[in-house]
Amino acid sequence: MLAVLAILAVSGLYVGVTNDAVNFLNAAIGSKVAKMRTILSVATVGIIIGVLTSSGMMEVARNGMFNPALFTFHEIMILYVSVMFANVILLDIYNSLGLPTSTTVALVFSLLGAAIAVSLYKISGDPSLSLASLGGFINTTRAMGVISAILLSVIIAFIFGTLIMWFSRLLFSFSYFKMFRKAGALWCGISFTAIAYFAVFKALKGVLADTAMYTWISDNLLIALLLCWLVCTVVLFFMQMFRINILRINILTGTFALALAFAGNDLVNFIGVPIAGLDAYKIAQEAGTNTIMMDALNESLPAQFIWMLLSGVIMVITLWTSTKSMNVSQTEISLAGHGDEVEGEVNSNVFSRSIVRASIGISNFMDKVIPQSVQEFVGKRFEYEDVEKNGAPYDKIRAVVNLTTAALLISVGTSLKLPLSTTYVCFMVAMGSSLADKAWGRESAVHRITGVMTVVMGWFVTGIGAFIIAIAVGLLLIWGGTVAFAFVTVACAYMLIKSNFDAKKKTAMPEKAVENTQVDNVLDEVCQMMKVSTQIYDRTLVAVSKEDRKALKELVRESGEMYDECHKIKYSLMPVLRKMKGSGLELSLYYIQVVDYLNEMAKSLVHITRPAFDHIDNNHKGLSEQQTEDLKHINDDVAEIYGSINRMITANDFSDIDTVLTMRDELFERIAITIKSELKRINAGEGNTKASMFYLTVLSETKAMVLQARNLLKAQRYFLEHSGVQKTWAAMGRNRI
C-alpha cells in the first residue's frame, strides 16, 4: 500500500502541477513576452528557489480535516490512499477538459470525503457509536473555510482586476509607447513594489519571518512600500534610458514571484498526504502494531527538505513536458484575449445572454448621462490597436496588471488571514482585466461569460466531485479489501495512461488546425468530408431498410459530429481570411464558397439521418418494397457522383467536370420521377403517411446534398486554380478516398 501511495504521489504531483501551472504562466504566455523556453526557465528558477526556502507545514493532510487520534494505522492508510486516488482521478478529468481548478479544494474535500467513508465504517462496526458520533471524527470548519475562499476570491479578484485595468488603460491607452516613456517607470515601480510585497509576505515569509528586516517592514509597512517604490522607480527610469524593455522584465519577474510562492507554500499540498502516510507507517513500525491509534499525527511538522526538493524536480519536469498544462492555460488565455473568436467556443445560456442584454441597456443609459466629450475621450483611450505587432492575445500592459493585481491581492489576503485561493485570484483577475480592456465585444461576450461561468461552476463541482469520489473509493477499499484495492489501482492507471495518450494525439490538433487554415490543406479537408458523408449516407439508407435503430442512432451521432466540425470551420473564417489577405479578394471569395458548400452538405446529411432515426425510433412502419428499391438506385447514383468528385479533387484533374454535371442532371431527373410516382401512390391511397413523408424528405435532402457537392467541386476547382496549388494528391493515398 505504501508503494502504491508513492506512485500516486508522483501521479498527483503531475496532474496537480499540470493544472496549477496556469496560475503563474498565463500572463507571460498570453502577452508573448518571451519565447516559451525563456518563460519556463524563469518559472523553473522560481520553483527551485521556492522549494529551497520553503517552510510549508503538513498539518492539512495530517490533521486538518479529521481527528487522527480516532483512527488506526490501517484506517489512516486507507484514508490517504482514497484521497490520492480521488485527487488523481478528479484533476486528470479537469486537465483533460482544459479547465483550471484549485488543487487545494480538491485536497481538502478529498480528505473530508475519505475521512467520512472511514468514519462510517468504524461507526457501522461499533454498536456504541451512531451517526451522531460522526462530528467527533470530522473537522467541518476547514471545509467551510475553503468554500468561503471560493466566494471571496471570485468577487474580490474580478472587481479589483476590472478597476485596476480600467484606470491603467485610461492612462496609457492601447497605443501606449508615447505615454509609457513618460510614466512607465513610475507605473512599473508600483508593480515591482506589489510583487516585492508579495514575495516577502507570501513567497519568502518562512525564511524572513524571524529576521530584523521582516520585523521592521511589518512595523513600518507604509514607509517600506514607499521606499521600495522610489528605489524601483529610479532604477527602472535609468534602465528605460538605456532602452531596456522594463515591461518585459516586469512580467518575467512577476512570473518568477508567483512560481516562487507556489513552490514555497502550495506545493506542500501535493506531497502532504503521501508524506503523512509515510509518517504513519513509521509510527506504526516503531510501535510494532498496526492497530495503534494515530494521535501522533496531531503534531504539526514542516515539510522535509528532501521531499520538497524531489517534488520541485517533478514539478519542473511536468512544466516542460506536460501537454495538458498548455490545454488548461489556453482556456484562460482564450477567454481573456482580444477578438471576436473564442477558442473552444461554448454555447451560450440564458443567464449569459441576459447579462449581455442588461449590460447593453446599462451602457445605453450611461451614454445618455455622461457628457459626449468625456465619452469621446474615454473611447479614444480604449480603441484597440495591436501596436506590439506580435499577434498576442493581449498586450504587456494587461499582463503587468494581471500579475500585479494577483500578487497584491494574494499577499494582502495572506496578511489579513483571508482564505483567498491563488487559482481563483489569478483566473478572475484575468477575466476582470479583459472585461475592462473591452475584450468582451458583443460578438463574443455571451460565449466568454458562459466560459467563465463554466470554470467558476467547475470550482464548486471540484469540491463536490472530490468529496463524492473520495467517499466512493474509501468505502470500496475498506469493505472490498485487496481485490477492491487492485481493481481501483488498475482502473486509475488505465485512466491516466489513456488520457495522456489521447492528450498526445491532440497535441497535433492545434498544429493541424493551423495547417488546415492554410490554402494548401483545404483540399484534404474537403476530401475527408466527402468520404465520410458518402459512407454515412449509404449506411443510413441500408439501416432504414433493415429498421436498424441502433445503427441509425450511431449515424445521427456521426453526422452531428461532421456538421459540428464543418460549423467550426465556417465560424473560424476570419483568422483564415486574415492570413490570406495577401492572396487577393477573389481567392478569399472562393475559400468562403468552399467552406459554405461543405457546411450545407453536412447540414443536408443531418436532415436525413435524424428523421431516419426518429421514424424507426417511433416504431413507424418501414418503407415499402418500391420505396426501398428506388432509394437503392438513387444511393448507387449518389455514390458514383461522389466517387467521381473525389477522384477529380484528389488528382487535381477537373477535365471530367462536365460528366459530373450530366450525372447530376440525370440523378435529379430520377428523383423528380420518383417523387411523382410517390405522389401518385399517395393520391391513390396507397402506402403509409409517415413513411411517405420520411421518403420525400430523404429525396429532397439528397437532391440538396448532391447539388452542394457539385457546387463544392466547381468552387474547389477555382480555388485551387487561383491559389496556385498544383499538387498531386495521389501520394496521400487513394485508399483514403
Image (cartoon, rainbow, N blue to C red):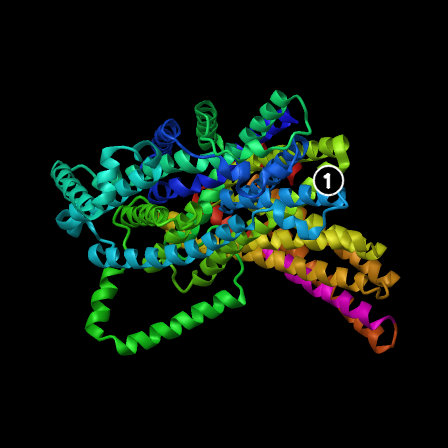
Instruction: Pick the quarter of the image with the C terminus.
Output: top right
Quadrant where the N terminus lies?
top right
Residue 698 on the magenta segment: yes
x, y percentage for residue 237? 13, 41
Can residue 491 be seen from the camera position used here? Answer: yes
Residue at (81%, 70%) from the top-left corner?
Answer: 690
Q: Nearer the viewer, residue 314 or 345?
A: 314
Disc 1 marks a residue whose amino acid type is Leu
Q: Is most of the magenta stretch helix, strand or loop?
A: helix
Q: Residue at x 60, y 33 (%)?
A: 294
Residue 673: % across, % down: 76, 66
Q: Residues within 10 Å of mark 1 (few under 14, many from 20)?
A: some
What residue do we see at 35% from left, 44% from top?
A: 27
- Magenta part of the chain: 687-710
Quickly name the residue at label 1.
476
94, above or below 49, in the image: below
| Horizontal side, residue 525 vs residue 532: left or right | left
User: Is 510 in front, or is 103?
Assistant: 103
